[in-house]
Amino acid sequence: MITPEGLSPFNLPEQPIYTEIENRTQLLQYLAGIFDVSGSITIQHNPPTTRRGESFALRLDFARTNPIIVRLIDQVFPASTGQYPNLPDGKTRNRWFAKAKKAEVVLETLKPYLVLKHGHLQVVDEFLALKGVRTAQESEEFKRRMVELNRSPIVQGDDGNLPDAYIAGVLDAHGSILLDTKIHLPGLTLNVTVNNHSFMQRVAQYFESTIIPQKNKNGSIRSYAVNLSANRALEKLVQLRPHLRLLQPLADLGIKFQNLRNSPGSRSKYEERKLEETRITAEARVILQQNNRRVRSPLG
């Protein structure tokens, strides 16, 4: 295992990976959704040493505080893993990364399913086409272009609705499932937030919803969100649930919660329902803590 400076090898207890999907295409769609919104593609500069000259290589990175998805990626694409301990927020970040030939194989496999990294793939193709004949100046220019794309990705054109498995990957990486027992609130809420308007247009198309800009205090837009609530959230969650890994236990609780809220009943049934809703939200809090996820608003 390659371990960069500052990282230690994985030493994690066995944890369940929530998966019911054996279909290879769906699994790759899921991983593409994850990597599109949370992974990075860079061109790494390797300075000259006493044993070799200067070189440039493709590099892929994915990091998460929760190890479940990192372990799944490494099962499908064995490469290198490590941990960033003692981050400023007190958490440990689990990391997967691949370089050079391994990175090329991973990208070639995910290429048909990537959407947000469309511009990156064009640069990668040009970079690899000149392998062995690139000058250092040309490689630096490819590296600069990749940095710009990481700031402002180019999204693949609208080729129809995104697959369920892909959206599940996006939801696991940049989504949340919220429950609220207050009767005047919708109960179940499904949220996806990503800082790219063109990409979120594709996500909004899938959810048949609209984009909501998330603004800073000074009025500037920091990201874009798509929200679904109550029965609309329930319908999509039932559709996405088989493809989820990290959020699947929370999805199960969300589906149970909203179905309970939809059930008719007398006053006594209402009190029983409220108690059950409270129990479900308490269980959901435990799952969120286990997942080490930050949420934008409290449960319940």
Image (cartoon, rainbow, N blue to C red):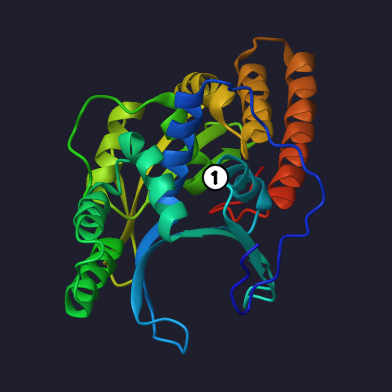
> Residue at 19% across / 56% down in the picture?
126
Looking at the image, residue 1 lies above or below residue 178: below
Q: Is residue 233 visible?
A: no
Q: Point out the image quarter for the N terminus.
A: bottom right
99 and 55: which is toward the camera = 55
**Which structural element holds mark 1?**
loop
- Tell which residue pokes out farthest to the bottom in this image: 50
> Residue at 39% across / 84% down in the picture?
47
Q: Is residue 53 visible?
A: yes
User: On the image, numbered disc 1 is attached to which residue?
Assistant: 77
> Residue at 22% across / 79% down in the picture?
136
255 and 181: which is toward the camera = 255
128 and 221: which is toward the camera = 128
Q: Is residue 241 toward the left or the right of residue 107 in the image?
A: right
Looking at the image, residue 65 lies above or below residue 240: below
Q: Is residue 167 toward the left or the right of residue 11 in the image?
A: left
Q: Is residue 145 toward the left or the right of residue 42 in the image?
A: left
Q: What kind of residue is marked 1?
A: Phe
Looking at the image, residue 61 lies above or below residue 157: below
At which x and y percent is residue 95?
A: 59, 61
263 and 238: which is toward the camera = 238
